[in-house]
Amino acid sequence: MTLPLLPFVIVCPLVFLGGFVDAVAGGGGLISLPAYLIAGIPPHNAIATNKLSSAMGTTLTTVRFARKGFIPWRQAALCVVFAFVGSSLGAKLALRIDAEIFTLLMLGILPLVAVYVLRGKSLGQGERPPCAPRKTLLISALAALLIGGYDGFYGPGTGTFLLLALTGPARMPLTQANGVTKAINLTTNLSALAVFLLGGKVLLPLGLVAGCFGILGNYLGTRFFIRGGVKFVKPVILAVLTIFFIKVLTQLI
């Protein structure tokens, strides 16, 4: 698919903003995915291309975490395997759904995810005593499978859901949960991306350029990070989601 300049003009600044927001308070996927749809990219291509730009940023973040020793590989290894399976199945399911039905699903799922993420629930506060190691590993692997399936199928909010599962039912310390989340998220992004590439749904030029903007946004957002960041994030996400809904509803009507 040969793309005009307009999708680049719309997508790249919003993916930059998504990367910035993600670094400050999370939830960047609630901006980056609608960005592609606002630009008129078909749903399957939007999900697939968003996976490419997201994977670029996730790769750099995961490498950074690994170099600093923040990823406990013993706990992460099994999770990565289950995440790979779940994400691959989720992406294959997404490709089987008709584009119009997929659009309607997005109209239903996206606001629910947005409400959940925007609640600003604190993570790692008042951590409970850890579970038995085997129980923690089992719960973590199950979370990686299920949330990995969601990420392959759709995506926004995955990092938040993983952190909630790993610090909640699995009772991992926040630092370990963060590291395992990065390893799982990289796995789900890459496995889903592989499925979408084989399916011919990824718009490579747009995804690669947008990915660079996302990396820049993430870098600047990390430097900008402050405790009150969520106050800035919520209005931005809501504004982008409102534009997305108006555009999609107009098309459907």
Image (cartoon, rainbow, N blue to C red):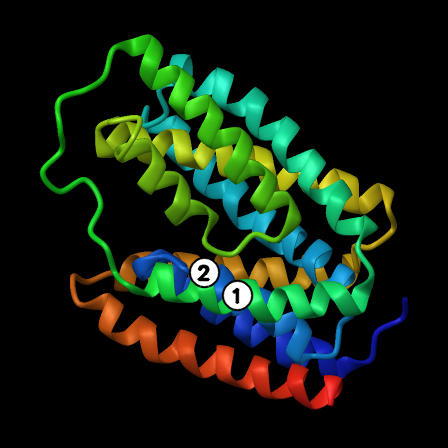
Q: Which is more toward the observer, 150 or 52? A: 150
Q: Which residue is mark 1?
A: 110
Query: Measured from the top left, where is residue 84 in percent x and y?
Result: 62, 28
Query: Measured from the top left, where is residue 49 in percent x and y?
Result: 71, 58
Spatial CA distance of label 2 from label 1 is 5 Å
Report the residue that reaches farthest toward the left.
126
Snapshot quadrant of residue 112: bottom left
Q: Is residue 217 in view from this perspective?
A: no
Residue at point 75%, 38% (across, down): 194
Q: Is residue 56 in view from this perspective?
A: yes
Query: Measured from the top left, where is residue 47 in percent x and y?
Result: 68, 58
Residue at point 80%, 50% (across, down): 95
Q: Which residue is mark 2?
A: 113
Q: Is residue 244 left or right of residue 136?
A: right
Secondary structure of the residue carrying numbered label 1: helix
Secondary structure of the residue carrying numbered label 2: helix
User: Within 10 angstroms of label 2, few (less than 14), some, or many (20 or more) residues?
Assistant: some
Residue 50 vertical placement versus 86 (above, below):
below
User: Within 10 angstroms of label 1, few (less than 14), some, or many (20 or more) residues?
Assistant: many
Q: Is residue 137 left or right of residue 150?
A: left
Residue at point 82%, 55% (across, down): 201
Q: Is residue 41 left or right of residue 216?
A: right
Placement of the C terminus among the 4 image quadrants: bottom right
Q: Amino acid under label 1?
A: Leu
Q: Which is more toward the observer, 54 or 69? A: 54
Q: Amino acid under label 2?
A: Val
CB atoms at circles 2 and 1 under 8 Å apart?
yes
